[in-house]
Amino acid sequence: MSEIRNIELWESGERKIGWVKRNMPLLRSIEEEFSRTKPFAGLRVSLSVHLEAKTAYLCRVLAAGGAQMYVTGSNPLSTQDDVAAALVHNGMEVFAWHGATDEEYHRHISAVVSAGPNIIIDDGGDLVHMMHTEYTHLIPDVIGGCEETTTGIIRLRAMDRAGELRFPMVLVNNADCKHLFDNRYGTGQSVWDGINRTTNLIVAGKKVVVAGYGWCGKGVAMRAKGMGAEVIVTEVDPIKAMEAVMDGFDVMPMNEAAKYGDFFVTVTGCDAVITSAAFGNMRDGAICCNAGHFDCEVDVAWLKKNAVRSYEARNNIIGYELADGRTIFVIAEGRLVNLAAGDGHPAEIMDMSFAVQAMSAAYLVQNKDKLTSMIIDVPREVDLEIARKKLAAWGYSIDTLTPEQEEYLNKGL
């Protein structure tokens, strides 16, 4: 039995899903294929991904392949209630609503895990974690799963090293057609979509501090530079720091960068990135937000504890006034700014990411008796096939190697 806010919102959600479907040609082609081949016939799929229109269309693509879907969101503030209603109206089991409390979020995750999934689609690792801690008796029915994010992969690798991971997981985030585009171009655009629509402030001429220079950080910094900001990067990895320098950005420790920043964006996947020491150095009016998976990168708890008062400065922006008179602003409670304060990545980007998800899930089913490792990379042929289809959808074609060229490249030294 689904648990959503209001089924009457379904028409609004349906319009959103229709819009993204129009702009997701890869998923449309996969939906057509799955409708014919039914790779998930008789199987249960439990999914926890940010529940907005693009995710909803992925759910429908999997359902077209015969899957019985059990759906929840991977972040309480990114769930869109009208989209959840549209899925339920269409006959899907959904357990999610916007603004869920910790207890409600846990209950919703539990609902999709307790359904006894054969395939898991995860974003951040919460489904896999609960399966391994609270529903171990259901593990024998799990063929495998797919993980969407860097944060989730970090958790999976830790479980694998400890010998605790008990079913195969495909590292979707590591596919080239995912992280090279979703993490860089998708995050780069959607983070600033969220910041701009929420603050209504100009970026040009401002100083932007980007914490973390992985693919997501690269995208955020690139877009900030393109809008005329002066960008400062903070890093713990000396090689990534060198990349940032050679890409034209200043690099310094966070506590030093805190003295200069107007906007702060954390994109590390770690915790305690902006803490009391940095807050102590920030200028009055500094704006902080997070684009990493969990809401632990900006120490909002410290601000709540130490502010002499807090107030809603603007919808989805809380101001924390400190004892010395300075006010520090936080967008979306420190949760994912591009989803909690926006609509997430553009549809064309998620078309590639979710194509990887759909094809990886099918790969698990097709190869369930051959899988020997608990950690599985997306097959190279899947990556290449998605890239070819995306280029064709854009109207581009490329060269192919002649037999003679292939022989030359493969003949060795």
Image: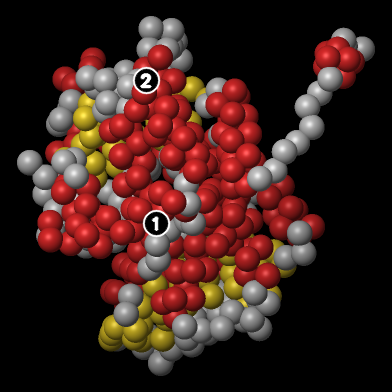
Q: Residue at x 35, y 64 (%)?
A: 340
Residue at image position (38%, 7%) is 369
Q: Is residue 251 above or below residue 329?
A: above
Of 407 and 288, the residue lying toward us: 407
Looking at the rendered image, the quarter that the N terminus falls into is: top left
Counting from the top left corner in percent of width and height, residue 281 is at 53, 78
Q: Nearer the viewer, residue 269 or 191?
A: 191
Kind of residue at disc 2? Thr
Indicate the quadrant containing the C terminus: top left, top right, bottom left or bottom right.
top right
Label 2: few (<14), some (14–19) or many (≥20) C-alpha neighbours in 10 Å: few
Q: What's the image's color scheme? A: secondary structure
The location of residue 143, given as percent across then percent down, is: 32, 18
Write down the residue under mark 2.
37
Q: Amino acid at mark 1?
A: Trp
Name the residue: 16% across, 49% down: 89
Q: Which one is in front, 97 or 279?
A: 97
Q: Is residue 48 above or below residue 143?
A: below
Which quarter of the figure has residue 309?
A: bottom left
Does residue 216 appear left or right of residue 275 in this picture?
Answer: right
- Mark 2 / mark 1, whichever is N-terminal: 1
SS under mark 2: helix
**Residue to which mark 1 is pinned:** 19
Q: Is residue 346 left or right of residue 19?
A: right
